[in-house]
Amino acid sequence: MASKQKRNTRRVELLPTLLIVLLLAIVGWQLMTMNEKLGAARAEQEQLAERIARQEQENRGLEAALARAEDPEYLQELARDQLSMVTPGQKDFYDVSN
């Protein structure tokens, strides 16, 4: 009988150890999963920061263009270059040698 009691005692002592090992394995797995998610979130954050920087740069360019749009000389230059317009009294010459 003493032998059976020792076996039962060993089993009882082994059970908490197995439960602790199992819990540690689960916690370790969750930590690895969270670490992967954290890495993905950091990568996404970097991409978004780059996108924000590009968008801010584009916004500065658009603000500069908007400020120039109120300049009459700039508007005349656009009219001449893009619409082939001329001011009254100005002569426009075309190169027909091509």
Image (cartoon, helix red, strand yellow):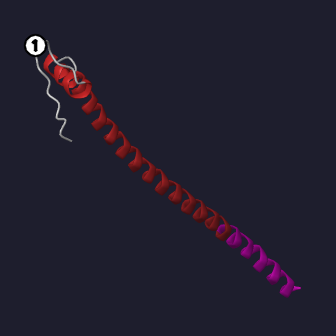
In the displayed image of the protein, which residue is found farthest to the bottom? 3
Q: Is residue 53 above or below residue 85?
A: below
Q: Is residue 17 a member of the stretch shown in magenta?
A: yes
Disc 1 on helix, strand or loop?
A: loop
User: Would residue 18 appear left or right of 39 to someone viewing this image?
Assistant: right
The part of the chain drawn in magenta is: 1-20
In the displayed image of the protein, which residue is found farthest to the right? 1
The residue lying at 57 percent from left, 59 percent from top is 33
The residue lying toward the viewer, choosing from 87 and 34, is 87
| Residue 25, quarter of the rendered image | bottom right
Q: Is residue 26 above or below residue 76?
A: below
The residue that disc 1 covers is 89
The residue lying at 37 percent from left, 43 percent from top is 51
Per the picture, the main secondary structure of the magenta-coloured stretch is helix
Q: Is residue 54 above or below residue 79?
A: below
The residue lying toward the viewer, choosing from 70 and 82, is 82
Measuring from the top left, give residue 43's x and y in whole percent: 43, 53
